[in-house]
Structures are given as C-alpha cells and as structure tokens.
Image (cartoon, helix red, strand yellow):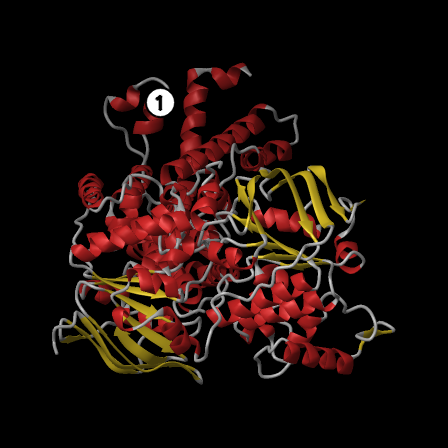
Amino acid sequence: MTNYKLSLENISKSFGTLKANDQVTLDVRPGTVHAVLGENGAGKSTLMNILYGLYRPDEGRILVDGQAVAIDSPRAALAAGIGMVHQHFMLVGQLTVTENIVLGMKGQGLKLDLATHVRKISELSQSFGFEIDPEAEVMKLPIGMQQRVEILKLLYHNAEVLILDEPTSVLTPNETGPFFELLERLKSAGKTIIFITHKLDEVMTIADDVTVMQDGKVMASLPKSDTDPANLARIMVGREVLFQVKRSSHASGPVVLRLADVSASNTRGLTALDQVTLEVRAGEVFGIAGVDGNGQAELAETIAGLRPVDSGRIFLSDSDITQTSISDRADKLGIAYVPEDRHRDGIVLDESVAQNMILRTYDRAPFARFGFFNPGAIRDHAERLTSAFNVRMQSVDQEIRFLSGGNQQKVILARELEGEPKVLIVAQPTKGLDVGAIEFVQQQILVQRDRGVAVLYISTELEHLLDVCDRVGVLFSGKLMDTVDSSEATPERVGLLMAGVAA
Amino acid sequence: MESLLNPQAITEILTTSLRLSVPLVFAALAGVLSERSGVFNIALEGKILAGAFGAAVGAFFMNDPYSGLVVGMLFGMLAGSILAVLGVTFGVNQIVTGIAINIFVLGITAFLSRIVFGAQANTLRLPGFKAFDFPGLSSIPIIGPVLFGQDLMVYLMFACVGLVYFFLYLTPWGLAVRAVGENPAAADSAGLSVPKLRYGCVIAAGALAALGGCYLVLAQVFLFSEHMSAGKGFIALAAVILGRWNPVGAMCACLLFGFFDALQLRLQFNYQEVPHQFFLMLPYLISILALVGLVGKPRPPSAVGRHYRREAK
C-alpha cells in the first residue's frame, strides 16, 4: 500500500461556514497523470493550495512516498518535491526567464551566478524540447511559453510531483496538442502530474487516473479505462448532461445587423479592428472565434456603442446606427449586450441582485416614480426573473458578489433578454463557468435564435462556438479572416484561421 | 557671466553641487530600496530629520561624530520600523502612514531638541567630519578639489550607491527584493517571505535616509535646527522617479538637482539686483520640467504601495 507517490488522507478545510474540503482522500501513483475533475467551486483549488502549502488544512495529513510530511509553506512543498503551476501564473514579468527560475533558491552565495544558471536552464529546456530562451524577459513571451517557463521552473527545482491548475485554459486549440505531448515526455521522465480541470475531453485524452470532486467531497476515484465521459459528467454534476445542445435547423431571416468596413482602435490607440465587414441574420447565431486579444472585445464594444468607430458604418435593418448613443441602441433599437468582463462591465458587485436587475431600466416606471425608487416593484421584478432563470442565491437582496460566476451570468442574461431584443451580443459568456452553467447559457442563446434574434456569439472556446453557431467568423489581429459555415467548421480548419493562416 | 566661467568659479559651483546633493542621494537610495520592495516611501523627509536629530544627540553626548552617525542611523531605522509595522504588517495605507511619520518626527524632534539642547541649540558647534585632501589627486585642475577634497561622508555616499546597486542587481536577495516589488504573489509562491523582505528594505532605507540627515548635522552646519530637512525628502522622491528606481540613475538625478541649487546660489550672489526669489525657484522648476519632459513614461515597481496578504481572496 505504500507504493503511492503521493497520498492525501482525510483532508478537511473550512472557510467560515463553507466546507471547501470535506474528508478528502486521494492516492496518486508514481509516473502517472492523475486528473482532478470538478465544477468551479468543487474544492479542487483549495485542495491543491493545501498540498502546495498556501493553506493549512483543518485536519488530515499528506504522505509523500509513504512518509507523512508537514507542508506549511510553498518552500516546504518544493522541498518535498511538490511544485505547482497556478492558473494565474506566478511569474514576475519584468524579470528574465532565468531570474524567475532561480528566484527563491537556497544556497546561492553572495553574488548571483546567473551565467551558470542560464547554461543549466538552457540544457534542461533542450532536453525536454521546451524551446525557451533563458534570457528573454518573461512579459514579452506568449502565454503558452510562459506556461513552459513555469514548468521549467519546477523541474529546475527538482520537483517530482507537478500540480497543473487548469493548464489548458490559456492555450489555443492548436497549442493543446503539443502541450499534451510535453506532458507525455514529462511522464516518461518519471514525473508525476496532477492535472486539475473541468474539461472532460482532456481527462479522456491525457489522464491515467481520475478523481471527481463535488461540493468539497471526493465523489469517485478510478482509472480512466473504467469510465467514459458521460459517466464522469454524471458524477461531476450529479445529473445527466446534454453534450450536444439540441439545435433545430431552420431557415434564417433577413439581415439585421451589418458592419461595413468597420475599423476601431483599442484603449492604447492602436488599430484593433481592421475593416471588418459582416452580416448577422435574424434567427442566426454568428460566432466569432479567435485567440484572446485579436479584437473580439473591441468588436463587441463597437456594436454596443461603447467604443467609437474610426471608419466604416454599422447598420441595423438598413438604418445607419454608427452615431447612435449607447442607451438608444439598447432601449430603442433592441441591442442587448452581455459583456466579456462580468465584474467590470456587467454587474455592480456591491449592489444587490435586485438592483443589478434594473441597471438598464432603473429610471422608469414601475421601478421609479417621481424620482423615487419603488422597492416593492424592484423586488417583484427580481423575484420573477431569478426564478425564471433559476438563479441560485439566498435572496434578491443579497449582494451579487456572493453569487457564483454562473449565477451572476444568469442575472445578466435575464436582464438583457427581458426587453426582447432584436440583436444579442454575447462576449465570452461561458468563461469560467462550469458544465451545468455553460449548458444553460448556450440553451438561452438558442432560445433567442429560435425567437428570431440575430445573435453575435464571441468566444475563445472553440468547442462551445461550434456547438451553437450557424456560421463562424475568425478574427486575427483585427481582421475577419474568413467565415465558415458550421457544417464545414472543423476545429482544425478554424484553428488554422485563428493562427492567422488563410484558407 | 564671465565670473561664472573661470576655473575657480566652476570648481566652487561643482563642489557646492556635490555637497548639496549628498543628503538627497542618501534619501533617494532609501527611496529606491524601499520602493523596489513594494513599499511607497513618502516618509523620507521624516527619516532625514530623525537622522539629523540622532546625529546631533549622539555627537553632543559622546562628543564624537562617529557616535552621531550611529545614533542617527538608529533613529532612522526606528522611523523605518514604524512604517514597516504599520504599512507591511497591518496594511495601513502607506501614503497616510508616511505623512503621519513626517508630521510626528517634525513635532517630536522640535520638542526634544529644546529639552536636550535648551537655549544653546542655535549656538552649538557639534563635532563633525572635516574635508581632507588626497595628496596629488586633489590638485588636478577643476575637478580635483571636487572629487578628492571632500569629507568622509561624501565617499561613504558613493560607496552606498555602489552597494545598493550591487545588492539589487547582482545578489540573490536583490533579485528577491525586485520580485517582491513587482509581483509579491509570485515571490511568495517561490518560497520567499514577502513581509521579511519588505521589513528589511524599509528599515535599511530608514538608516540610509538618516545618513542624509547625519550629513546635514555632522558635515554642513554642526548643529540641529527644527525642520532642517526642509523638503529634501520630497526632492529625493522626485529623484527616485527621474532615476527610474535605479540607484545610479537616482544619484545622477540628485546631482542634477544639486547642481541647479548651487547655480542659483551663485546667481543670487552675482546678480543682487534681481529679486532672489526668482533664483530660488530654479531647482524646483528644473525638477518639474525634468519630470514633465521626461522621455517615455516612468514605470514604477508594479506592487508599490499595495499591501500583500496571502489568503486575500
């Protein structure tokens, strides 16, 4: 029984009244990829932060190679051979790759011998095929490379167990394949990998064993060969999950939203949209794919009226709305907008759910009369919408910051869809949501489409786009590369366009 | 203008420039060190004053400038510790804490100086550091007396610039300090103690800034007077920005301010028909112009002024 590389025994951790981990037990075989699967808030990150010494468990113990170890700091974790790559990288952008890697190393002497480290890191990097320049400044490296720096850092510190927290969430579909190959190489070098994810297909691709968590508890722990995606999903969510959201095929109507040669600048004054021309028809979901930061945010903001165009025109059913104000677009013309950054643009975190529900309509009857709020009407309105959208919360008076991401997104959707819009712009609506919430959001989008709304659906998650969209356009450095019909849009084809390779 | 350009006048202006720059350089080094670790140090002014008072007390009771130096640095470290405890441990806003320290030191030193020195405060002549010549080198024309005819603390200042530079850029601890100032979460994750590093830097910065105050007392005026720091801590703060949080850059910025201060003194003397207030403005005008006309945008350490707490979620 002692041939496990790492064992967690009966780990519990509470934050206030919330039990984030409840008697969690987990055994990891050496030289394997062990996936820890669960929805957001299932307690995966808390467990890993305990393993990495950032949190202290209330009870339970950790064994490495059969020996109980006390891990009370990241340094102690590294000393026990456990290293972690966080979802948000722990790199100092202003320092070089080598400086980041040697940061915090013991026994350096008085003067830092960077030249020797550069040489050793270069050798290590080559032996695993990382292709990293050890003297590059980290902030100038692409995200995929920064992730490799994080892994290289752990290897250089002789970590035997690598914890990877949602590692693919920052990668493009085309980067995921090479990343998995890298994990295979690490595995054959004898490293043990704990892979935290909420994506089932990744578990099926890369994992040897899988542990499923829900509400802070381990629901199941089994070899991958003993399970299948549907089974895992059922354990994870606690109910059946539809994999293919049902999409009825029906003819789309006339063009509702039209962009003609629209160019716009980003906040730094650089060109973010470069002569984009597109048409969205009534009853159609038009997807925008692309790697984050290629003009998606600017496209959504331009149509919603938050960002002025530099040139070009925007039409709504043949009338030019390029100069129309934000509120007119939303109220009179029926353009609904679900912004990418929920917390910054979608809701007011410190206000109640009910207040957030009337952000668009707060100044008119029945919510306001003679310049005063009508609390009864505001509450009734919120009660009605939250039950229609199945928002889980304590009451409509609860501050919205205490709701989960999925429930916050439901509040925004409920508010935006209430006025029966003609056009719906949704930017990254599934970002950070778990399987159940994603399913809900996508179904709502399809309901709107079937109602005849012209939907523009922007997402960096290609699978989600292909599930829902009728046509997909790809943005690459501000240009619309090509538009592909969903029947012909394979991940490979769209992936190439996302990398800037024209078909 | 002729009288400004003869070799003797140039030597005099440069010597005065350097002497006026010394307190600024010590304080600016303190600012660089503390801000690199992520702690905004608006308390430089108070630390200079604490150092000056400590220097006067030490030199007065022990009748020896070295004791003045030690006591001065201790007082500066004490002021630094207040900033560290409030700003790093308790997470009190660092600007508010800094302002509080400045006001507190101003009051307490004025009060204590009356108790310690009494009526003789303004007639006192404390022991101090005298300028000395390096034989041969000090007779090099124009720059000889400037560089090789100074007192001990001037050389100590150059040594400190070198030391801070070496520390920040060539040692593992310096790397740790820079990391803590840019991304404390990353440093924490690498097993470094963010509070320990910040405490170390802020207290060491207290000692460095205090040396600036020691210089005022032990090498310039040989007595303590109320509010003798006279805004030098704030000019040093500007020099930190102008020098891009680099010890050598900050020193150059201080030398620039010192030069214009020396120049305006000389101009006041040479052109007595012009109201002296116009010349007095010169160094401050230059600081404003230098900061406004700076090429490129200065980029402070990302985490400066921000409290770091691990389990903050």
Residue B183, position as x, y percentages in the image: 39, 54
Q: Chain of mark 1?
A: B
Residue at 33% x, 37% y is: B154
Give the amino acid at mark 1.
Ile
**Residue under label 1:** B143
Residue at 38% x, 56% y is: A168
Which secondary structure lies at badge 1? helix
Quadrant of the rendered structure where residue B244 is? top left
Relative depth, front residue between A20 and A98: A20
Relative depth, front residue between A438 and A293: A438
Residue A454, position as x, y percentages in the image: 68, 55
Relative depth, front residue between A193 and B99: A193
Measured along the vertical axis of the image, is residue B118 above or below residue B123? below
Quadrant of the rendered structure where residue B187 is? bottom left
Judge left or right: residue B220 versus residue B231.
Answer: left
Residue A177, position as x, y percentages in the image: 33, 50
Judge left or right: residue A256 versus residue A15.
Answer: right
Quadrant of the snapshot with the N terminus of chain A: bottom left
Alpha-carbon neighbours of circle 1 within 10 Å: few (<14), some, or many (≥20)?
A: some
Residue A23, position as x, y percentages in the image: 31, 84
Q: Is residue B213 visible?
A: no
